[in-house]
Image (spheres, helix red, strand yellow):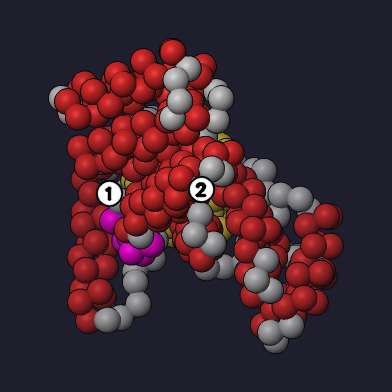
Amino acid sequence: MLDPRVHDPEEYEGKGVVIRGCQYELGRLVGSGGSKFVHLLRNRRSGLTLMVLKVFRDPENARGELARELAAYGLDQMLGFGQVPNLMEVALDGAVAHVQDYHGPYEPAPRAELLRGQEFLKAGRWAEGVAALEVAVQAQPDHTVALNNCAFGLVRLERLAEAIDLMARVIEIEPNYLPYLQSYVEYAAMARRPVEVLDGFVRIRERYPHNHSCDDLAAQVPGWAAVLNNSSIDLARAGRLTEAVALIGQAVAVYTRLARTDPQTYEVELAESLLNLANFQRMAGDPAGALVTLYDATDIAERYRRRDLIEFARDLRQRTLSAGPG
């Protein structure tokens, strides 16, 4: 494994590095200057090179370059030009590093099926492109470029669920490449799948805190959660309790993720959705599930001193324990 405290720069090539749980290998040197050494970064699982790793032996140089990159990004945004390359900070023992997109070849010799599939996609022949890429994926199941391109074709064929599943596989293999994370969020938003939107958005924010490409999509999620909550109430009133429980469960999952990112704004809404879930569970004949849910809702209500929610939870608990009517 790479250790800049021990290894000289000429020894970096071939060393391993783990970035947010993903294993990479440093390839050849492609640039240097001062205390900075830039190496290709190959994903050990996929075998592909999508990024470079800039290793700075002087942390001050790293901070200065990051500041310049952000200033350029801000100027580009103001003038309406393209964005500067994606950049992620990485802490190494004895050094600071930046991961950045690599625009060279991702592998020496792509398979014929992959190249054929890409040509079909460029021509707008979506079904043929997907078929060719599926053959490529069968031969190389961890090839994220083939998987990503196949997902792109599936979206054009309006097979969104399959595309999202493929992109989930892609970001499990390569969790740090921003274009993949962006596609995952975009496809999930097209399908109105708020849990996946938030999960992808959080990954972006953790890795690329200065990137705001998916902020607008994530901002739609609270509205989707409210729709899920209100729709579940309508279903319960119509006596469709199984569907109501399933839908409010989705709302709870979304509010749980929202509360992790902004507890002051969303924990009370999480408590309200949990109370609805508990009520529907009770009405559907699941008192044990209702009591567990009530425990979680009451904990939040008490922390925020929401007497209205505390009293509602107490009333629900009494009705659940007495198996009274809804």
Badge count? 2
- Dot 1: element: helix
Between residue 323 and residue 244, name the one nearer to us: 323
Q: Are marks 2 and 1 in contact (CB under 8 Å)?
A: no
Residue that extends furthest to the bottom in the rendered view of this protein: 123
| Residue located at (51% from left, 54% from top) | 193
Depicted 40 relative to depicted 241: above or below: below
Q: Is residue 30 left or right of residue 62?
A: right
Residue 15 visible: no
Circle 1 packing at 10 Å, graded few (<14), some (14-19), many (20+), is many
Tell me which corner region of the image, top left, top right, bottom left or bottom right, holds residue 127: bottom right
Badge 2 amino acid? Ala
Residue range in magenta is 210-218
Instruction: Give x and y (percent) for residue 318.
Output: 36, 15
Select label 2 or label 1 by which is in front: 2
| Residue located at (44% from left, 13% from top) | 322
Depicted 90 relative to depicted 278: above or below: below
Q: Is residue 288 left or right of residue 65?
A: right
Cα distance, mark 2 to mark 1?
A: 60 Å
Instruction: Give x and y (percent) for residue 113.
Output: 82, 69
User: Which residue corresponds to mark 2?
Assistant: 238
Q: Earlier in the sequence, mark 2 or mark 1?
A: 1
Residue 314 falls within the magenta-colored stretch:
no
User: Which residue corresponds to mark 1?
Assistant: 62
